[in-house]
Every structure is written in C-alpha cells, then in structure tokens.
C-alpha cells in the first residue's frame, strides 16, 4: 500500500485499529496475561523478545488478515523487528494493515489533574526512521485524571504542538489525550476536553490528524470532532474495560472505531494451539469490528 491507499483505508475502512504497542512498564503485565511468567526472561532484551514473539503470532494469525483490522500501532522495537521474515511494517502492509508507531517516551508525574508527556527528545530521529521504514502515522499518549480546565488545556496544547512536528515529518499523528475512565468527574471533564480539541483542530489549516479518545460517558459526545474536516478518523481506547464492556460502550458512539489493546488480546495464551489462538483472536476481532461499525 502506498500513502494514498493507506490514507483511504484509515479514513473509510470498515474495521478497527489494533494496539500492539505495550512498552516499558506495561510489558511484564502483558506477558503474564499471555502466560509468560517473569521467570522465563531476564532483562529488557529477553523481555522484548518474548513480547515480539507474541505480536508476531498475532500479526501472522489468519484472522488478523481478514480485513477487519485496518491498522496496527507498534512499539519501536516491533517496528525494527521482523515478522515472518519481513520487516514488521511490510508484513503488516502485505496483510492490508496500516502501520503506526508509538512515539511518546512516557508520562510526567500528575500535576493540575493531568499527566503530560515527558519531553520527546528522541522524536526527530524516531520520525526519520519511521518514514524510512514506510510507516503511515504515529501515536502518543497523555492522561487526564480530573476536570481541571487548565490541565486539560495544557495537555491538548502539548498534543497538538507535537502533532505539528509529526505532520512536518510527513506522518499522520494520532493524538491521544486519554481520560481516566475511573475519574469521578469524567462527564464534566470530557466536555472541557472536546472544547479544547475543537480549538486545536480549527487551527490546523488544511492538515489532517487522528484522535484516540476514551469512550465518552455521554454517547455521541465526540461527533463534532468525528465530523471535523481536519480529522481523518477518531478511534477509541479500551481504557481498562473488558472486551464486552468496551464494545458495549463503543457501539453507542457511531463514527468512532476501536483501537483496543487489552480488549483485543485478553483471551490469548502462549499455550494455545495455533487453531485455538486464532479462534480466540478471531472472536475478539469480530466482536470489536461489529462494535466499531455499529450505527
């Protein structure tokens, strides 16, 4: 797929985006969920080798290439690795899946009700490498913990500021100001978040971004962003919901498609046969795709 084809697939494809970008502190938990105990690896290299095996198994499973997964977000080490003897981005594109790369470097401590992204000092080199490897877009996450208007404004401003650097490099940024789904004031804060996002979108000129947002408390809240001319697609994170709960909430938000990690991978185990593995993955893919296409 070339850039034009990938753009069309993300803008109009009937499906969802798989989040395969666990990194750092979240990787041991993901491995334990898959059935790889901490005692089975030692050090970061072995840990990432184990997670790469899992991701490779996902990407090469028959159900992953059935057309319902239109994109996948990768961690840098996955992008740099091979899947089925090919560079990972090429292996994805051969299966009709548009590749994205996670570019943030973790979160700052909470202040003003939010966790901003840490300085992205590695971003220029990572973007250069991502372009060379044929990646389509990027993803970067920050987190909102409470309805602090100043904090929310700052977190959205940071997302758009970095997003413009990514656009300048020739990639499509997926902005992810996640709202913690356990926050008591989330309904109020999401109204503030939408207003700040719309301001940022209106200032983009003719450039396109994507948004990755928590499924809102108020169904349909993000419809104005979905319909904004500067938005290629709005995707939803599962945010800790189970697959069933995430899909139930997502289905109430027409135009918003999934970009799930836990919701996609929760029933996969290392000890499953290839047929069992593909059946579990395929079941999740079908369920998530159905919820993404609802309405």
Image: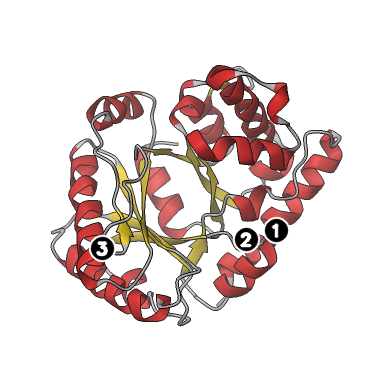
Q: Which residue is mark 1?
A: 286
Q: Which residue is mark 2?
A: 289
> How is colour applied across the structure in the image?
secondary structure
The location of residue 138, given as percent across then percent down, is: 36, 42
The circle drawn on residue 112 is 3
Contact between marks 2 and 1 (CB within 8 A): the answer is: yes
Cα separation, mark 3 vs mark 1, equals 40 Å
- Compared to residue 90, the image places residue 285 above or below, namely below
Q: Is residue 288 left or right of residue 259?
A: right
Q: Is residue 83 visible?
A: no
Q: Depth check: 222 or 157 in front? A: 157
Q: Depth check: 267 or 97 in front? A: 267
- Compared to residue 11, the image places residue 218 above or below, namely below
Within 10 Å of the Cα at label 3, are there few (<14), some (14-19), or many (20+) other Cα atoms? some
- Compared to residue 29, the image places residue 126 above or below, namely above
Q: Considering the numbered disc 2 on the image, is that residue within a helix, a strand or a loop?
A: helix
User: From the image, which quarter does the N terminus lie in?
Assistant: top left
């Amino acid at each position: 797929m070339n850039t034009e084809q990938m753009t069309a697939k993300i803008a109009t494809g009937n499906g969802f985006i798989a989040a395969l970008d666990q990194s750092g502190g979240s990787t041991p938990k993901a491995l334990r969920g898959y059935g790889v105990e901490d005692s089975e690896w030692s050090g970061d290299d072995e840990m990432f080798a184990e997670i790469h095996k899992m991701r490779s198994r996902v990407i090469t499973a028959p159900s992953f290439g059935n057309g319902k997964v239109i994109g996948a977000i990768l961690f840098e080490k996955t992008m740099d690795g091979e899947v089925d003897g090919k560079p990972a981005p090429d292996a994805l594109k051969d299966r009709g899946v548009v590749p994205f790369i996670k570019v943030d470097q973790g979160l700052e401590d909470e202040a003003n009700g939010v966790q901003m992204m840490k300085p992205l000092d590695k971003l220029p080199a990572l973007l250069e490498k991502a372009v060379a490897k044929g990646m389509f877009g990027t993803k970067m996450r920050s987190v909102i913990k409470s309805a602090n208007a100043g904090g929310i404004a700052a977190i959205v401003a940071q997302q758009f500021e970095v997003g413009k650097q990514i656009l300048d490099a020739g990639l499509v940024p997926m902005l992810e100001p996640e709202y913690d789904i356990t926050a008591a004031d989330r309904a109020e804060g999401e109204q503030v978040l939408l207003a700040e996002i719309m301001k940022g979108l209106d200032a983009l000129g003719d450039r396109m971004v994507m948004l990755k947002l928590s499924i809102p408390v108020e169904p349909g809240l993000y419809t104005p962003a979905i319909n904004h001319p500067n938005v290629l697609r709005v995707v939803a994170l599962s945010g800790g919901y189970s697959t069933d709960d995430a899909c139930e909430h997502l289905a109430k938000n027409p135009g918003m498609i999934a970009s799930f990690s836990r919701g996609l991978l929760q029933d996969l185990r290392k000890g499953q046969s290839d047929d069992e593995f593909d059946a579990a993955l395929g079941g999740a893919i079908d369920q998530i795709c159905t919820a993404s296409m609802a309405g």
